[in-house]
Structures are given as C-alpha cells and as structure tokens.
Amino acid sequence: MITAFVLLDVDVDRVPEVATELCGLEGVTEVYSVTGRYDLIVKVRVSRNEDLADVVTGRIGKVTGIAGSETVIAFRSYSEEALDAGFALGQDPPA
C-alpha cells in the first residue's frame, strides 16, 4: 500500500465543509484540522501510484475551498504499533 499525506491550504470559512467532503472520498482514510502552515492534513492510502494521482488531482483537487496543496509520500511507518511488532519477531509470546 502507498500512504501519502496531502497538506492543504483551505479558505478559512470553508474548513469544516472541506474536511467533511474529503472524509467521503475514496482513498482518503483520515482528515485532520491542524495548526501551523496548513489548515488540513489528509491521509491517503491506495494500492498504486496511478490511484494516488487520481485521488489527489481527480478528487481532492476538485473540492471547492482548497486554495493550495502539497503532497508527500511516506517511505516507511515508524508508529508504535509497527515498531512493537518488529521488535517482537522471534520472541516467545508473553505468558
């Protein structure tokens, strides 16, 4: 699976509506309202690069109220859950 994060500049008065619409798009798994440089961060998970292009430009890019975007693709996940599973390989299960 390919995971990408789409960082969005959104018209201030449209943030809740844009976030709600994004949540309904195929390929979008999570949407966060954040502080800082961007207004929303969208997590996208797809099987192929072609699908990523379709989600980002064909779906997200067409949502009214988005003023700009930047997309980053994740190489690897270092989440606690993934790290714990990796360190547990080859160990006996807890008693």
Image (cartoon, helix red, strand yellow):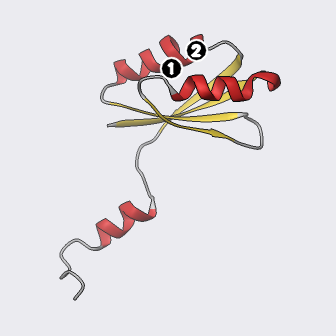
Rendered residue at 56%/25% (across/down): 22
Would you call the spot at circle 1 few (<14 residues within 10 Å), some (14-19), or many (20 or more)?
many
Give residue 20's quadrant in the image.
Answer: top right
Q: Which mark is residue 27?
A: none
Give residue 79's quadrant in the image.
Answer: bottom left
x, y (%) of residue 65?
71, 16
Residue picked out by circle 2: 61
Rendered residue at 27%/74% (across/down): 88
- Residues 74 and 8: in front is 8
Is disc 2 placed on a helix, strand or loop? helix
Marks 1/2: CA distance? 6 Å
Q: Decide: is 74 above or below 27.
A: below
x, y (%) of residue 70?
62, 27
- Residues 11 and 91: in front is 11
Quarter that holds the C terminus: bottom left
Residue picked out by circle 1: 56
